[in-house]
Every structure is written in C-alpha cells, then in structure tokens.
Image (spheres, rainbow, N blue to C red):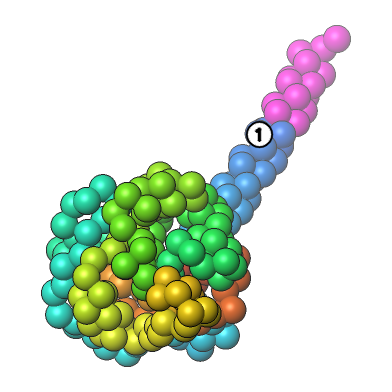
C-alpha cells in the first residue's frame, strides 16, 4: 500500500470519526434542550390561569393578623405564612367527602410538584368546626394525609374572622335534635397566599390535581 493510499484511508477514518462525534454532540444538545424544557415550569398568562381554574388578583390583598393553633398546639399567626407559598383549605375532620378528597388531592399535588417548587410551598387545612376539631383531633387527622401538612384550629370567632378576610364562607347545619348533630357547609376553594403573607388569589372548585400543579408552578416561577 502506498503512502498516498494510507493517507487517504486515515483521512477517511478521521472524517467518519468526526462525523460520529458531531452527531453525538448534536443529540446531546437536543436532549439537553428537551430535558430543560420539560423541567422548567411553563409560564401561563392570567387568561390561561383562569382557564385552568386559578384566579390571581391584580394586586394581592393584605389582611390582618390572626391567632390560631396548629396540630402540635403551637401558636400560628400571619408570620407563619411568610416566606413560603401557602395553599390554604377550609374544612373539618368530620366532613364525609369534600375534605378528605381535597386533602388527598393536595397530597398528590405536593408529590408531583417540581422539587424546587415543592420546597417553597406549604399546605394548610383550617378547621371550620373548631369546637370538635381540637388540637388532639387534628394531630391524628392531618398526618394521615401528609406529616408535613398543617392543620389549624382556634376559637370560633378567630376562625370566622380569618375566613371572612379570605372570602371563605362556612355555616353550621343542624342534622338532628342533639346539639352535636350538625355538619358544616363550607367553601371548597383553595386560597393562595404568597410568601409576603398576602392573599394572592384562589383556585376554584371543582379541583383538578394536574391543573393545580400546572398553575401553581407557573405562579411561583413568575413571582420569583
């Protein structure tokens, strides 16, 4: 074999090698862009948010401080709503359907959130039946859904004032002659509070886990 032929063969092999390398690099770049696209939360317009059942106020609303207790018996005030996004749901442990369904849904949402977003969010249930939902009752109920969820109770008037500020209506409904025979009709919406402790908006019922995840990740990313 002549030196010329050897040189041509070497050039051909090098050409093939460079082509393969270029193809591999191209595939890696495409895959990187694809993974980045699916990992970065989609930013929705206000119109898109509304189409997905989430309503954000043009100007978040400031509300007054309050005093409640969590399932550990610790005081919970406005300060505990600062520094994180809060998804706040008004319900009660004796609720036969809406409340356990919503709590289960919120657990699913939490587990499916982008990890970076999940670290910025806390999930809270405020009892609209504080007479029966004592600290001890909440301490047994809340961890059934998620140990990191927060349950709040307190004096009836304190709960009522807090709920009123967040447009969360509830009303006791008698179901029998005994004073303890009652249920509580309540709003099924989820209140959204931003890290400044301001009423940022709400997620309207009926609730859908995939939509909550989509809109929440968009709101948190856009706010940051």
Residue 171 appears in view: yes
Q: Magenta includes 30?
A: no
Residue 109 appears in view: no
Q: Position of residue 200 (x, y in %)?
A: 32, 79
Q: Which residues are magenta?
A: 1-17
Q: Magenta includes 13?
A: yes
**Mark 1 Cα within 10 Å, few/some/many (few <14, many 20+)?**
few
Above or below 9: residue 21? below
Disc 1 is placed on an element classified as helix
Quadrant position of residue 86: bottom left
Residue visible at 71% across and 34% down in the picture: 20
Above or below 145: residue 195? below
Q: Position of residue 42 (x, y in %)?
A: 51, 67
- The one of 60 and 177 positioned closer to us in this rendering: 177
For this orientation, the residue located farthest to the right is: 1
- The one of 151 and 106 positioned closer to us in this rendering: 151
Quadrant position of residue 62: bottom left
The quadrant of the picture occupied by the N terminus is top right
Q: Which residue corresponds to mark 1?
A: 21
Q: Main secondary structure of the magenta part?
A: helix
Residue visible at 37% across and 53% down in the picture: 137
Residue visible at 41% across and 47% down in the picture: 140
**Side of 125 relative to 96 (left or right):** left
Q: Position of residue 167 (x, y in %)?
A: 34, 87
Above or below 62: residue 154? above
**Side of 149 relative to 112 (left or right):** left
Above or below 174: residue 223? above
**Side of 10 relative to 88 (left or right):** right
Q: Position of residue 211 (x, y in %)?
A: 57, 71
The quadrant of the picture occupied by the C terminus is bottom left
């Amino acid at each position: 074999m002549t030196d010329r032929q050897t040189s041509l063969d070497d050039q051909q092999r090098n050409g093939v090698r460079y082509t393969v390398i270029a193809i591999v690099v191209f595939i890696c770049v495409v895959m990187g862009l694809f993974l980045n696209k699916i990992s970065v939360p989609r930013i929705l317009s206000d119109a898109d948010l509304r189409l997905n059942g989430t309503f954000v106020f043009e100007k978040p609303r400031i509300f007054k401080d309050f005093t409640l207790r969590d399932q550990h018996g610790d005081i919970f005030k406005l300060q505990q709503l600062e520094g994180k996004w809060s998804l706040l749901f008004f319900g009660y442990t004796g609720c036969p359907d809406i409340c356990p369904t919503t709590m289960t849904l919120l657990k699913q949402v939490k587990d499916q959130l982008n990890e970076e977003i999940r670290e910025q969010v806390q999930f809270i249930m405020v009892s609209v039946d504080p007479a029966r939902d004592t600290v001890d009752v909440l301490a047994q109920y809340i961890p059934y859904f998620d140990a990191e969820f927060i349950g709040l109770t307190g004096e009836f008037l304190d709960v009522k004032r807090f709920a009123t500020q967040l447009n969360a209506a509830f009303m006791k409904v008698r179901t029998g002659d005994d004073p303890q025979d009652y249920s509580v009709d309540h709003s099924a919406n989820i209140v959204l509070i931003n890290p400044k402790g301001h009423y940022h908006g709400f997620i309207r019922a009926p609730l859908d886990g995939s939509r909550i995840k989509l809109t929440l990740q968009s709101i948190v990313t856009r706010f940051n």
